[in-house]
Image: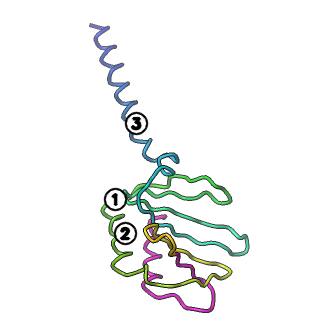
């Protein structure tokens, strides 16, 4: 009877370990670098220290950050895939791909949807004030980070 309990316990333990390994593997850097879907890339750069904060939201809701002064990506968290999908649809519905902001400043903000490979919004300079819809969309993305 004791051996049956030990075997059952061992089996449950192995299944748990497999589940944990499978669950965390989707949040690894290798899963991020192999990801082929659309990404929303956003962040800021510059300022006194010249640092860059860059985030990548994937369609499945995973959020990664490019570590400061590094080339390493770090998993931040997962959000509900429906909420992530809303960000991607809003980008299209708000016609962000039609906006043209290439006005970097001392502290610049940026936004990119990888479906539009040559399209990057950068603002923060003094030449062109940013549209309110771009600003509101960017702020909503930043709320994901908090």
Q: Is 33 covered by the magenta stretch?
A: no
* Residue placed furthest toward the left: 1
Left or right side of 91 for 112? right
Please, what secondary structure does the residue beneath circle 2 have? helix
Q: Is 139 covered by the magenta stretch?
A: yes
Badge number at residue 20: 3
In x, y percent, where is residue 123? 57, 82
Q: CA distance from mark 2 to mark 3?
A: 29 Å
- Disc with the residue nearer the chain's start (1 vs 2): 1
Name the residue beneath numbered marker 2: 88
In x, y percent, where is residue 11? 33, 21
Badge number at residue 62: none
Q: CA distance from mark 1 to mark 2?
A: 13 Å
Q: Looking at the image, do the residues carrying marks 2 and 3 touch, with CB atoms under 8 Å apart?
A: no
Left or right side of 66 for 144? left
* Residue placed furthest toward the right: 48
Q: Looking at the image, do the residues carrying marks 1 and 2 touch, with CB atoms under 8 Å apart?
A: no
Give residue 25's quadrant in the image: top left
Out of 127 and 38, give the one closest to the viewer.
38
Q: Residue at x 73, y 74 (%)?
A: 48
In x, y percent, where is residue 24? 43, 42
Q: Which residues are magenta?
A: 120-146
């Amino acid at each position: 009877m004791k051996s049956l309990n030990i075997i059952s316990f061992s089996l449950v333990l192995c299944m748990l370990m497999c589940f944990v390994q499978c669950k965390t593997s989707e949040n690894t850097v290798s899963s991020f670098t192999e990801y082929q879907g659309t990404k929303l890339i956003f962040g800021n750069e510059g300022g006194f220290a010249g640092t860059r904060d860059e985030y990548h939201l994937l369609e499945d809701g995973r959020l990664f950050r490019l570590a400061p002064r590094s080339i390493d990506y770090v998993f931040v968290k997962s959000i509900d895939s429906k909420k992530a999908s809303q960000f991607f649809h809003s980008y299209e519905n708000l016609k962000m791909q039609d906006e043209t902001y290439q006005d970097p400043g001392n502290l610049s903000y940026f936004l990119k949807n990888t479906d539009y490979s040559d399209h990057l919004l950068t603002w923060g300079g003094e030449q062109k004030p940013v549209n309110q819809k771009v600003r509101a969309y960017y702020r909503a993305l930043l709320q994901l980070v908090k």
